[in-house]
Image (cartoon, grey):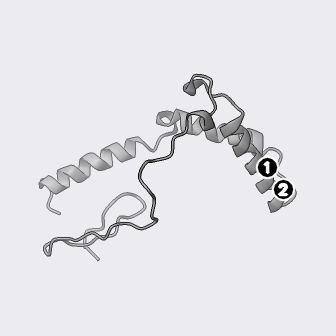
Amino acid sequence: MKIGSPLARDFARHYERSARGKHPQQNGRHERMHLTLKKEATKPACRNFLQQQARFDKFIEVFNNERPHEALNMKCPAEVYQPSPRPYTGLLERREWQPNCQRAIQLPTHHLPRKGV
């Protein structure tokens, strides 16, 4: 990928957007759900894995079916949930790449290595 090429510019824009989304301040609802989960399902910790799993299961049941959410006009998520009209097959479509494309592995840091695979 050459610096200044359209691909490099697109990558830079994508990286800029994805890097901004990695801060708790920008994911308030999601962070709030984790705080609620932590308070209600992990403090204090249970004595064993099975007890802890039962506690998580109870939290999910209450969170989705009994607890109203302000963001949902005081409805429970189960009341407003609609399944996707598209069936899930569990398989991804195979992609066909142009012969001149190079494969590369994206690193956990969201950077691409200088050389392809």
Name the outermost residue toward the right.
Answer: 47
Helix or strand or loop: what does disc 2 sit on? helix
User: Residue 21: image x %, image y %?
Assistant: 42, 42
Q: The N terminus lies in which quarter of the figure?
A: bottom left
User: Residue 36: image x %, image y %?
Assistant: 69, 37
Q: Which mark is residue 51?
A: 2
Q: Label 1, on which residue?
A: 55
Position of 99 with respect to 18 (left or right) is: left
Residue drawn 25% across and 46% down?
Answer: 13
Of the residues shown, which amino acid type is indicated by label 2? Gln
Residue drawn 50% across and 34% down?
Answer: 25
Location of residue 114 by image quarter: bottom left
Of the residues shown, which amino acid type is indicated by label 1? Arg
Work out how far the residue at label 1 is from the one at label 2, CA to CA, in angstroms.
6 Å
User: Residue 47: image x %, image y %?
Assistant: 87, 57
User: Residue 90: image x %, image y %?
Assistant: 46, 65
Location of residue 98 by image quarter: bottom left
Position of 81 with respect to 91 (left or right) is: right
Residue drawn 40% across and 58% down?
Answer: 109
106 is higher (above) or lower (below) than 72? below
For the residues bearing labels 1 and 2, Cβ distance under 8 angstroms = yes
Mark 1 neighbour class, 10 Å CA radius: few under 14, some 14 to 19, many 20 or more: some
Location of residue 5 by image quarter: bottom left
Name the residue nearer the viewer: 56 or 68.
Answer: 68
Q: Which mark is residue 43?
A: none
Position of 37 with respect to 3 (left or right) is: right
Position of 98 with respect to 42 (left or right) is: left
- Tell how many labels: 2
Residue drawn 82% across and 60% down?
Answer: 50
Helix or strand or loop: what does disc 1 sit on? helix
